[in-house]
Image (cartoon, rainbow, N blue to C red):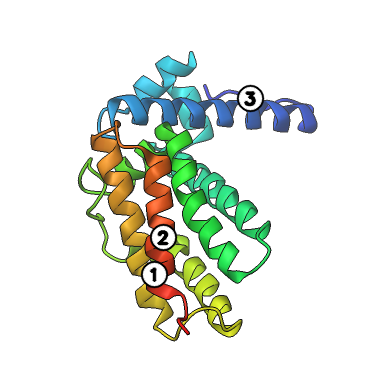
Amino acid sequence: MSPRRSADPEAATFTERARRQQLIDCTIELISTRGYPSTSLSAIAERAGVSKAAVLYHFSSKDNLTQAALTQVLDQFGGYVRERVAQAADPLAALLAYVHAMIAYQRDHRRQVRVITEMLLDDHGGTRLKTPGSHDTYGRWQTLAALLADGQEAGVLREFDTRTMSLAIGGAIDGVIGHWLAHPDLDLDAAAAELETFTLNAVVRRA
């Protein structure tokens, strides 16, 4: 018999949201430690202390639950970056804030990075997309391209194709993070500083 929803709509909503969040948190934990293939609905249910049927009550399949986990990670990642970019005083500072925030979030949220690499990338080193162009789905290069266009409009960046440049800068960030995932001894703070210099050298208008 399927579980019944609470007769109190507000109480039911609160309880269900809390349970859904618990299941998402367990999914993130398991993917980050066991990998995506080994993260089954049964394993998630066991970690959450509920039955598999209870998991299916909130998410009808493993795909739906893991996609909800990925969406939460990407939303949090994007929010973190946007917040820091919004605090920048000018277009050039905003561009550097983007590069720094992309590295800083991944440095401080290794579990979430593992979820992204497990679900979006073919290899655990974090370099080959399962679906080429899937960055487009999450608006990643478009966000950076918009920052680059703002800098061009302000006259502080040289003329270039913003799509190509955003893909190049994004690829450099991915390369550093991919290496760090395989070699955690890499100093990401130093790497972020180098990436900022790399970006400035690539885009700043010279006299």
Residue 114 x %, y %: 35, 37
Answer left or right for 85 relative to 49.
right
Residue 171 x %, y %: 31, 60
- Mark yes or no: residue 68 visible: no
Q: How many marks?
A: 3
Q: Write the residue at 31% across / 48% down.
A: 176
Q: Which residue is mark 2?
A: 197
Q: Write the residue at 33% across / 67% down.
A: 168
**In the image, is residue 40 above or below residue 149?**
above
Q: Which residue is mark 3?
A: 4
Q: State the CA–CA distance, disc 3 to disc 1.
A: 61 Å
Q: Residue furthest front?
A: 207
Crowding at mark 2 (Cα within 10 Å: few <14, some 14-19, many 20+): few
Q: Which residue is mark 1?
A: 201
Closer to the camera in the image, 43 or 112 = 112
Closer to the camera in the image, 8 or 17 = 17
Give the quarter of the image for residue 201: bottom left
Q: State the CA–CA distance, disc 2 to disc 3.
A: 58 Å
Closer to the camera in the image, 125 or 189 = 189
Instruction: Mark 2 and mark 1 in contact? Answer it, CB < 8 Å.
Output: yes
Of pointers 3 and 1, the one earlier in the residue sequence: 3
Tag nearer the camera, 2 or 3: 2
Asked which secondary structure carries label 2, the reply is helix
Amino acid type assigned to the residue bearing label 2 in the image: Thr
Amino acid type assigned to the residue bearing label 1 in the image: Asn
**In the image, is residue 148 above or below residue 66?**
below
